[in-house]
Image (spheres, rainbow, N blue to C red):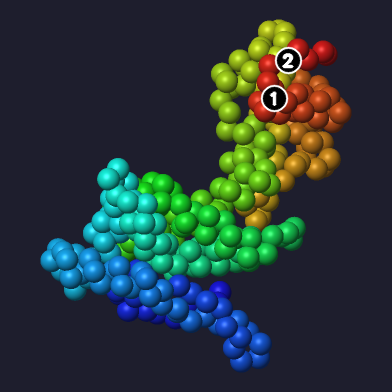
Amino acid sequence: MIPIPSRDFNDKFYTFLIPMGGDNRQICFRWRTETALKKNFSSYQAAEESFLLWCQGQDDYSIVRKFLEIYQHEETTEREKELAQWHLTAYLETPCYQAASKRFATFSNFNDLTDDWEHYLHLARCLTNNPEEILQIYRKYRRREYDLEKYFMWEIASKIRDLSYRATGQGKYSPWYSLKNTSATNLNQALVNHGVRAENIERYLIARSCLFEVYAKSEQGRWISPNLNEYQAAANYCTRYHFTIDVQEIQRLIKICLEVLRSSPKIISF
């Protein structure tokens, strides 16, 4: 993780990170002050005693709430909304970079990593540049659990993970996760909706159950498609405890289960 320099409390609302070339050609960061934002921030300090007290008490929770309210207020001018949005984005610079670095470090443990660090930073910036996303995270914050910046970092990292999983079909967006966690009742109904005869449905439910007796997430925590050995083990388990089945048939049953969970209703011929 690239170290991020600290900044004074007030600076959090009008400074942004910029990369610089360091020793041995390694990237380092420094903070750049946005003059218009600093001037606007100072005007709030001069005009509102409560705002000044928040700054003196380093009450970022109240200041973030203030800028969110400005952004949401119907009578706020477009210029005021724009400045409020940039104050929020500036505040989230450190959580943004930390979240991107955390996600990249996690996913870099996988052998099939295809996205670089800039990709995760882009996802993080899409979130921190969106006041509606910021508001959703802010509303869930409980002040005694973490400091606000750390809370934003964890939530942004979580959202990056979900966006990545959604794009790659991993995590809770994996069809294998869905197959494992769908209740027997819901899978039964999905099979019925797709034209599977009632007398045959139990075979599908048992095949699904047998597969997950021998198959689970990888050691890296990813849902990877079962290999032939795992299908064979599932067929052996089913044959031993339920009914005789070969590997091709259990693969066919599982394939249909996946199809009925992710596709629109249609009749399956079998």
Asked whether 160 or 62 is in front, the reply is 62
Question: Which picture quadrant has residue 107?
Answer: bottom right
Residue behind mark 2 = 266
Tell me where residue 41 appears, x and y as whole percent: 28, 69
Identified at 65% across, 40% down, the residue is 174
215 sits to left or right of 10: right
Tell me where residue 226 appears, x and y as whole percent: 76, 41
Mark drawn on residue 238: none
Residue behind mark 1 = 263
49 sits to left or right of 160: left
Question: Which picture quadrant has residue 194?
Answer: top right
Residue 151 can be seen, yes or no: no
State if disc 1 and disc 2 touch (CB < 8 Å).
Answer: yes
Question: Which picture quadrant has residue 89?
Answer: bottom left
Residue 245 can be seen, yes or no: yes
Q: Compute the Cα span from label 2 to label 1.
A: 8 Å
Asked whether 34 or 26 is in front, the reply is 34
Identified at 81% across, 25% down, the residue is 252
126 sits to left or right of 255: left
Amino acid type of the residue tagged 1 in the rendering: Ser
Asked whether 149 or 70 is in front, the reply is 70
Identified at 37% across, 71% down, the residue is 36
Amino acid type of the residue tagged 2 in the rendering: Lys
Tell me where residue 166 appears, x and y as whole percent: 62, 44
Element on which disc 1 rests: loop
Tell me where residue 200 appears, x and y as whole percent: 73, 12
Q: Residues within 10 Å of mark 1 (few under 14, many from 20)?
A: few
Which quarter shows the C terminus? top right
Which quarter shows the N terminus? bottom right
Q: Residues within 10 Å of mark 2 (few under 14, many from 20)?
A: few
